[in-house]
Image (tube, helix red, strand yellow):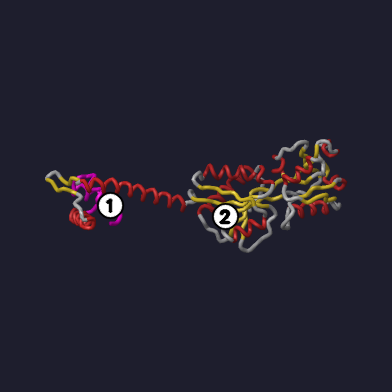
Amino acid sequence: MDLRHLRYFIAVAEEQNIGRAAARLHISQPPLTRQIQQLEEELGVLLFTRTPRGMELTGAGEMLLEEARNIRALVEQATERTQRAGQGKLGRLDIGIFGSAILDTIPKLLTAFRTAYPEVRVVLHTMNKQEQIEALRQRRIGVGFNRIITPLADIASELVTQESLLLAVHERHPLARLAVVPFTALAEHPLVLFPSGSRPSFVDRAIGLCQQAGFVPQVAQEVGDAVTAVALVSSGFGVSLVSASTAALTLPGVVYRPLAGLPADARVDLSCIFRSDDHSPILAAFLEVVREFRSRHYPDSPAA
């Protein structure tokens, strides 16, 4: 029994007439009659009683009609789901996340993707930069999010945004009294930098900016992430140079101040990374949402 047999059988059962069924199927009557006979021979039962009025279902035929309609529905559903998967509208996308962008930009982007593709299941994994790269190469994730990406032959990237820098400072700290903090003022205060771990990272960017401004920073501590850095600021341990996304993090006593005297390019990027040979429809759909999100929310960010 094949799907063609079932399709022909359903047409005859619903039309109760070989002629009308043949017209519906756009075939002639003799081939259709042979197909029904072959189906009955294969099953070893009579499916129709031939009467002057047409074709009436037997008890076995009624049972097959019910099952055939169920099979047809399943095939149609499978066809639709396969087509949707081929269009990137159905499936699963594993995403590696890390850093301050999870406090603001990444949730907004994921919400935009879920709205556009509600049948794609998104699974998040907390991984640092090197872990994301390894997971991409091992095909355990399809996309990662990180900053300051070193070019790699097998890893491509798509810019999401470039964020301005802020100073996280305790409200009782002298610098908190300033509406705008001169960047060179940081030379006199201990800095909490992040993230520790694989380099280059935002730590290198911060130190480089200090050196460019003519001073060597007093690095009090390097910590794993923005949350830990701002928590130390909250306890009065020092001040921290952070991306604009981090300002979404509210901890007791912490305020954020803009900085003056920074170079024009003193911004920090946020990119999504993926395998350069990954041509999956889901990834293509996700990247399209990233580009649309960037143009809508961060029109001043350059294209990747």
- Dot 1 falls on a residue whose secondary structure is helix
**Any magenta on residue 26?**
yes
279 or 59, nearer to the observer: 59
Which of marks 2 and 1 precedes in the sequence? 1
Farthest bottom residue? 153
* Range covered by the magenta-colored residues: 1-28
Q: Residue at x 74, y 46 (%)?
A: 228
Q: Residues within 10 Å of mark 2 (few under 14, many from 20)?
A: many
Q: Quadrant of residue 169?
A: top right
x, y percent for residue 246: 71, 43
Where's the N terminus, which quadrant?
Answer: bottom left
150 in relation to 104, above or below: below
* Residue on which the image places disc 1: 6
- Dot 2 falls on a residue whose secondary structure is loop
Q: Amino acid at mark 2?
A: Gly
x, y percent for residue 157: 62, 56
212 or 110, nearer to the observer: 110
Q: Residue at x 66, y 52 (%)?
A: 146
Q: Quadrant of residue 250?
A: top right
x, y percent for residue 77: 39, 48
* Residue on which the image places disc 2: 142
x, y percent for residue 184: 85, 47
